[in-house]
Amino acid sequence: MAGDDAASVLELDDLRRALANLALEQRETLILAGAGGLSYDEAAQITGVVMGTVKSRVSRARASLARALTEERLEARSSRAGSAMALILQEVEHIR
């Protein structure tokens, strides 16, 4: 069980690092609609764009994340791996 927890922490940190490599607009939109749990309409209101743009940004961000995670194009892990979820959620609050 402990190995699974450690693997989950590392996978979440991989996600955090991949998110950091996204274009700002894509990262903000994906975080709002994903980790933030907001609807596309709510994300559109916060970011000041139309819903179609939000959908496009989320789609492109997901594709970029998938490529980054499967091709292992991430910088080296830091000692902050255990706090990855907290860092992602802090971005939600910052963007809102």
Image (cartoon, rainbow, N blue to C red):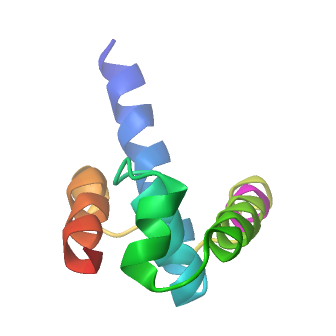
What is the chief secondary structure element of the magenta stretch? helix
- State the residue at coordinates (62%, 68%): 51
Provide residue 3's location: percent of width, then percent of height. 38, 23
Provide residue 21's location: percent of width, then percent of height. 57, 81
- State the residue at coordinates (19%, 69%): 93
Number of labelled discs?
Answer: 0
Does 62 appear in magenta? Answer: no
Which residues, given as a range, are shown in magenta? 64-68
For the N terminus, which image quadrant?
A: top left
Query: Left of 62 or right of it: where is 50?
Result: left
Provide residue 61's location: percent of width, then percent of height. 67, 68
Residue 79 shows in the view:
no
For the C terminus, which image quadrant?
A: bottom left
- State the residue at coordinates (31%, 62%): 88
Residue 56 shows in the view:
yes
**9 shown above or below 36:** above
Query: Left of 56 or right of it: where is 82?
Result: left
Report the residue that reaches farthest toward the top: 1
- State the residue at coordinates (68%, 56%): 69
Provide residue 7's location: percent of width, then percent of height. 44, 34
Q: Nearer the viewer, residue 35 or 75?
A: 35
